Amino acid sequence: MSTISLPNAAPPVAEAGPPLAEATAPAARGWWAAAWLLGAVAGAAVQLQQPRLWAGWAYAVVLAAACLAVAGAAAARRRGAAAGRRAAAASVLALGAGFLALFALTGLRAVGYASDGLAPALEGKDLRVTGVVAAMPQRNEAGTHLRLDVESAALDGAPVQLPHRIDLAWYGGPFRDAAGMADLQRQPPALVAGERWALTVRLKAPHGARNPYGFDFELWMWEQGVQATGYVRAGPKDEPPQRLEATGTHPVERARQAVRDAILERLDGAQADGDDPARMRIAGVVAALVTGDQRAIDRADWDVFRATGVAHLMSISGLHITLFAWLAAAAVGALWRRSTRCCLAVPAPSAALVAGVVLAAAYALFSGWGVPAQRTVIMLAVVALLQLSGRRWPWPQVWLLACAAVVVADPWALEQAGFWLSFVAVGILFATNSIAPGADPVGARGRFYALVREQWVVTLALTPLTLLLFGQVSLVGFVANLAAIPWVTLVVTPLALGGVLWAPLWSLAALSLQPLAALLQWLAQWPWAVLFLPAAPLWAGLCAVAGGALLAAPVPWRVRALALPLLWPVAAWQPARPAPGQVELMAADIGQGNAVLVRTATHALLYDAGPRFSRESDAGHRVLVPLLRALGVRLDLVMLSHRDADHTGGAAAVLAQQPQAALSGSIGADSALQALRPATPCVAGQQWTWDGVRFEVLHPLAPDAASAAPRPNTLSCVLRMEAAAQGAAPAPVALLVGDIEAAQEQALLARGASVRADLLLVPHHGSKTSSTPAFLQAVQPRTALVQSGYRNRFGHPAADVLARYDALGIAVVDSARCGAAAWSSQQPAEVGCERDLNPRYWQHRLPPRSTPGR
């Protein structure tokens, strides 16, 4: 096969024998094998749905039952697999055996892994850790991130047990500790993979944001084998970090780091000499193509790549590894045929096949051995072993075998979107005979036709799946991939890899990327480059995936037209909105900050936009924009309570994606956001009504809003929302108060402001400076929401503040335990927590707070 147009495609192995799609094995044996493989994948998938792990002995019992089922299936086959009933019985037993075996083995692995977790008593303590840097460190403007393999640890001189692998941030410059005290950190040095260091660290269990349709950080950490995260304590009062020695461990990571740094130094240096400023971003792409360091690519460039559907090409993916395997096999085969002795010892096609897989595995290892690379190598190895064994399985069994092999190696891949994109694409190409060996077109025209056909088939098949998984699809992706796939795979990547042997080739690779970057930026700027649709339910998504497969199938177009009704539910889906007169709030889980989405029947408001995490990441880009797209929300107003970074950090990303939204708040005339959209100050007395819901600003007063207060907190916008009354019950009210403090709370009470509410956003994240008893007695909320980060450095919410709420019988819901919190005026006494929906055993749980009685 001359071109491969998707990640994780099987390597071209036409020379090694007849097509794999020829079903020469007995039918009964084929059904038995297919049943076992299907059961294995299903068993792992079901185990991943468990909210909590069983005890290890329970999984051992299931594994014993699987062994009995295997014995029964083997006995049924021996007694006569050709007999219809016995063959059916053997297949059922094989299905059950595969299911039970992978269910039990996955559970046993999870139990063993979970037992190595961080003890809760060690969270937030100063620990002296000795370990080896296990991966090439990542630097940004805030400091350095490193992964450490722990060798020993001590608390106050006494040895303690820590997880084997931890992730650390070593911040540089001013940094605030858990007590909020400013501390000047020692600047992180140039760390190198394989070095042994002694460090003082503070750790916590991996705890990510939990939002609807959001990224599962805790699953990602689980798959990476990381069971604790934290930061290096390097202040003047801390025991200083100490480099002990350079070890011989992790030589691949050390080599990767040397190559990455050499690429960035060479190509970034060219910009310093006056070259195009876009060259620095291209340097990151070249580094990613060679070493798999995706963080080297600028976030703005990632946005372009995603908009044009070529993100899979701009880092080490299954496509690159498959291409490398094909080129390596072709080169080894050509050299092997020159030696008669070698050909007599091992046939050239077999030698080429083995060499292709082995060298592809080496390339994947050098690229960081990421999960997509692991999946690709396993799939290539499975297909190669089948080819070498002389077995000629039908393509569904080959596909199932490769899928099962990946699941056995990494069951949690079933929860990753990349797994499904890869295997659905390969299955579609198998089914449509697009990657059948022996179908290689002849001549340039034939090869071009094959590339267009394959890309068209993949686009048709994967568009519905992409909408189901991501809620978006690139409408220019077909054109972009048609140009980018051959250019990146046949020109840019070989030049980038060749630079490892001769550095000037990196400059050529960067030069060859420039015209492609210009084309992609032009395509990304098209008005309809990307289609965003609200997240549809699973049943609608599965119908759409079936419709996409039918569109790609080699059947008459009158049959393919039946796919249109299957696609309609996804295309026309609209999430439910509140009834007229009602209001819904969702407090997003964005860590330490505020971000509350308010929706009525036809309008929407975003109160605050969360924090900025780094130059490349903020709550708007990471959480709020995907959430708004998934919910199909068009904002009418963005209200920023005040200008602190944990309230405005994500505003730029939100405003860029919501050009119709107005901006208001207490952000000051000198705010950089004013350049994006002129902001109207929020002033007490402002009122409006949306769909029968009354909105009113209670604070700040007009003279205060115009003044330059020394503390932005004092100018926080206080927003009151009153829904329509339901029967004789009082009208449900929600109150959002930003970071007001005791003085502002007292001023509201002195003015006689209407502050009674069913739902209160806790002032200043539960700081000791707010939530005075008088204010809480005036508000009398049923529920109080706290938006704060897990084990945040400010200690929010403060224990004595929580005690005040408990004393008044107010239920407190904090985002660290709840995740995204949803409240509706139709059920004002209830708050829905995202962490309570579809829980999984790898997710970090905090003990629930006791709900006080009223």
Image (tube, helix red, strand yellow):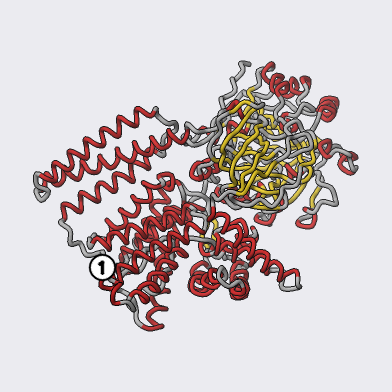
Is residue 250 left or right of 435 when viewed as pictured?
A: right
The residue depicted at 73 percent of the width and 42 percent of the height is: 646
Q: Is residue 475 left or right of residue 260?
A: left
- The type of residue carrying mark 1 is Pro
Tell me the quarter of the picture where residue 311 sits: bottom right
Check the image and report above or below for 485 versus 828: below
Mark 1 element type: loop
User: Looking at the image, is 765 positioned above or below residue 142?
Assistant: above
In this rendering, position of residue 694 left or right of residue 674: left
Q: Which residue: 65% across, 45% down? A: 604
On-image quarter of the N terminus = bottom left
**Quadrant assignment, res 674:** bottom right
Estimate how packed mark 1 is, as few (under 14), some (14 to 19) or many (20 or more) residues with alpha carbons within 10 Å. some
Please provide percent x and percent y for residue 784.
66, 27
Nearer to me, 339 or 516: 339
Task: Identify the residue shown where x is 62% and y is 40%.
Answer: 588
User: How many numbered dots are placed on residues in this image?
Assistant: 1
- For the C terminus, give its image quadrant: top right
Q: Can the viewer see residue 515?
A: no
Residue receiving disc 1: 19
Q: Return the residue nearer the eye: 235 or 776.
A: 235
Q: Does the rendering let one see residue 617?
A: yes
Q: In the image, residue 524 lies at what x, y percent?
A: 60, 66
Residue 789 or residue 731, whichever sits in front? 789
Q: Position of residue 727 (x, y in %)?
A: 59, 26
14 or 156: nearer the viewer: 156
Residue, x 52% and y 70% (percent of image)?
A: 493
Residue 564's x, y, as percent?
Answer: 39, 60
